[in-house]
Amino acid sequence: MSFLDDVVAGLSLPQKALPPKYFYDAAGSKLFERICRLPEYYLTRAELSLTRKNISSIGKFAGLGCELLEYGSGESLKTRLLIRALQPKAYLPVDISQTALQGAARRLAREFPWLRVLPVVADFSRPLELPQAKARRVAYFPGSTIGNLTPEEAHGFLARNRALADRMLVGVDLRKDANVLHAAYNDARGVTAAFNLNLLVRINRELGGDFDLRSFAHYAFYNAAYGRIEMHLVSSKRQKVRIGAHRFAFERGESIHTENSYKYSLEGFRTLAAQAGFSGSRAWTDRAGMFALHGLTAG
Ligand code: AVI
């Protein structure tokens, strides 16, 4: 499905929706980097701090000399910590953006001249084609990106990984006070709002849309029944929007659902992993108990 197909299909649903993978054009990726540095967005700092604090036991769990498969381009500090601790035989970053992968691979090669970097351009929500494994593989999925999948999609993703890796390290945001979650997705500087609205900017630019950005507002809330933050873009008036040859009508107050960010208790995520064929044999958390890194073992 192309960007246009996905947008047309999503805006034709009774609850209009857009896939969150389209947030990450160049401007969206920069906005996301800014989000990661916001005082309210605790996730990135908590995951980095738990990784630093526990790097030797994380390293023991994954094992020296494995092949490290990472979902993401490999730009983060956490990746560098892991590479230093694991001394992997090969590092396979998997990302949808060839440009992001090339840049990251170049920088990693400079920093770790001994490391074999094998970038894989792919969408991880689909089955992957990987080069032949020459050593045991460990898959790393940091950042709580698994929370942007529905539990059914997360189950499918984990189950597919059983064929690719016998151990996994998965970063997962923990359930917590709804006010803390609310602040993390409604920051005072409005960076998350700009990140959300950038989706419409992108549709206007790339698909010939005419979204009036002043008449859509960022709305994010914690849906406790589902254990997830939902992000929406809400139309402030009754209006029609054109995207190329297509037209979409909006009622006043009608929203486009742009993202879910699921939060899991330690037990809740272990159950999901077990249903997908992994036992949650280890979990590391930061001191304040905000975020978890799960060590999963196949079987
Ligand atoms: C990438 N992902 C884990 C982020 C999250 O927290 O769900 C994306 C994000 N959306 C709003 N802020 C950050």
Image (spheres, grey):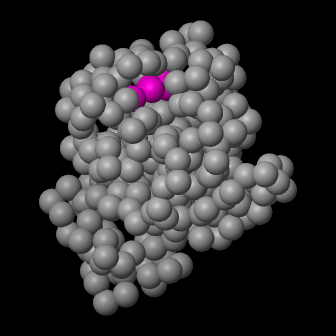
Point 32% across, 61% down: residue: 127
| Magenta residues, dominant SS class | strand
The number of numbered badges drawn on the structure is 0
Kindly indicate the quadrant of the structure image that contains residue 248.
Answer: bottom left
Residue 271 sits above or below residue 5 on the image: above
Kindly indicate the quadrant of the structure image that contains residue 109.
Answer: bottom right
Q: Which stretch is magenta?
A: 290-296
Task: State the quadrant of the C terminus.
Answer: top left
Between 51 and 196, the residue placed more toward the observer is 51
Point 31% across, 25% down: residue: 279
Residue 9 sits above or below residue 51 on the image: below
- Is residue 98 visible in this depiction of the protein? yes
Task: State the quadrant of the N terminus.
Answer: bottom left
Residue found at the very far bottom of the displayed protein: 245
Between 274 and 24, the residue placed more toward the observer is 274
Magenta stretch holds residue 295: yes
Between 15 and 175, the residue placed more toward the observer is 175
Residue 19 sits above or below residue 231 on the image: below
111 vs 208, left or right, is right
Point 38% across, 62% down: residue: 128
Residue 126, position in %: x, y? 33, 61
Between 154 and 82, the residue placed more toward the observer is 82
Residue 224, position in %: x, y? 27, 25
7 vs 108, left or right, is left
Residue 24, position in %: x, y? 54, 60
Residue 246, position in %: x, y? 28, 84
Residue found at the very far top of the displayed protein: 287
Residue 194 sits above or below residue 225 on the image: below
Point 64% across, 48% down: residue: 89
Magenta stretch holds residue 172: no
Residue found at the very far front of the displayed protein: 134
